[in-house]
Image (cartoon, grey):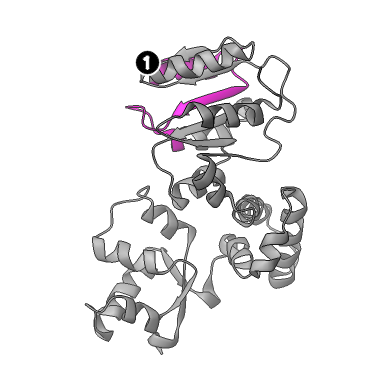
């Protein structure tokens, strides 16, 4: 029975694999890596020949206990949008436009067919979040990140003033200077901060930034927690965060996008990447 059960990696499993949950053993990480999409118990046993059926039952049981994987017929509600998107045909994915609103509406309609009318407001909120992520995944954002070195969420610049306030938060002076000069070239004088306290003060000021660039490797700062805090703080909802990270894995991008990041740029920074990314972030050409 176990060998024929189809398992899926949950959102928690994806985050665990990206290192943003309590550390897992190498074997558990290997099993989570194998479950990239849907895999049967038999597939897992073939992919991990060091295990026998008894071992497999123990390992699968522990990953399920931690909510890192789930049988396909028991995927939690807030994973449904991922599931539906992963089942789209390659032709359907290739035909998807960069209009995330229409795609999310379609996904939400499919989810409603499966789950029935949405009554619980909290459930609807979670589905909207996963719908956003599904749109990003279907748009090939990770492939784009690999080719271009950055990803900017569609319509990021909507509603920005002509001269937005910009804050750069990072601990590397040379990197900060490069970013500052690029914005100055665009006619914008950014504020540069190098500590967590200075960043907190910038976000708490009356003239809080419209755009915040944060180095994810900045010491004493958890950029993902900062993103999460910004997402739920109504006073910061207008701030667009651009995450600069040395990690370009799918799980890292997925986590950032689920938390509402506006753009994701992979280090080491390259001038040609920034020259391509900043006009999309600002919504206008830079001379």
Query: Bounds of the magenta span?
Result: 196-225
Q: Is residue 207 above or below residue 18?
A: above
Query: In which quadrant of the rendered image does the N terminus lie?
Result: bottom left
Q: Measured from the top left, where is residue 20 in percent x and y?
A: 37, 47
Residue 85 painted magenta? no
Q: Measured from the top left, where is residue 33 in percent x and y?
A: 38, 64
Based on the displayed image, in which of its 4 quarters is residue 67 positioned?
A: bottom left
Mark 1 surroundings within 10 Å by alpha-carbon count, few (fewer than 14), some (14 through 19), many (20 or more): few
Residue in front for this viewpoint, 229 or 33:
33
Residue 205 painted magenta? yes
User: What residue appears at the point 36 percent right and 27 percent down from the top-left corner?
Assistant: 218
Residue in front for this viewpoint, 90 or 205:
90
User: What residue appears at the point 24 percent right and 60 percent down from the top-left corner?
Assistant: 25
Residue under label 1, please give it.
Answer: 173
User: What residue appears at the point 32 percent right and 27 percent down from the top-left corner?
Assistant: 219
Locate residue 64 relative to residue 203 in the image: left or right: left
How many numbered dots are placed on residues in this image? Answer: 1
Mark 1, secondary structure of its residue? helix
């Amino acid at each position: 029975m176990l060998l024929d059960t189809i398992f899926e990696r949950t959102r928690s499993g994806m985050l665990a694999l990206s290192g943003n949950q309590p550390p897992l053993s190498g074997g558990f990480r290997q099993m989570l890596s194998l479950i990239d999409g849907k895999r049967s118990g038999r597939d897992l046993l073939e992919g991990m020949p060091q295990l026998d059926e008894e071992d497999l039952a123990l390992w699968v049981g522990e990953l399920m206990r931690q909510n890192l994987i789930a049988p396909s017929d028991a995927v939690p509600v807030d994973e449904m949008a991922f599931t539906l998107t992963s089942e789209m045909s390659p032709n359907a994915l290739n035909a998807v436009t960069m209009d995330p609103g229409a795609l999310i509406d379609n996904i939400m309609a499919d989810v409603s067919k499966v789950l029935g009318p949405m009554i619980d407001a909290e459930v609807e909120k979670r589905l909207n979040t996963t719908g956003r992520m599904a749109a990003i995944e279907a748009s090939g954002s990770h492939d784009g990140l690999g080719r271009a070195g950055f990803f900017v969420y569609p319509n990021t610049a909507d509603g920005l003033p002509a001269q937005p306030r910009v804050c750069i938060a990072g601990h590397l002076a040379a990197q900060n200077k490069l970013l500052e000069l690029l914005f100055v070239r665009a006619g914008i004088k950014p504020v540069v901060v190098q500590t967590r306290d200075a960043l907190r003060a910038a976000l708490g000021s009356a003239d809080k930034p419209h755009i915040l660039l944060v180095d994810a490797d900045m010491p004493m700062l958890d950029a993902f927690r900062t993103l999460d805090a910004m997402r739920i703080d109504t006073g910061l909802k207008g701030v667009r965060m651009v995450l600069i990270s040395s990690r370009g894995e799918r799980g890292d991008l997925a986590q950032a996008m689920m938390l509402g990041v506006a753009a994701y740029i992979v280090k080491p920074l390259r001038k040609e990447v920034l020259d391509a990314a900043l006009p999309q972030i600002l919504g206008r050409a830079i001379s």
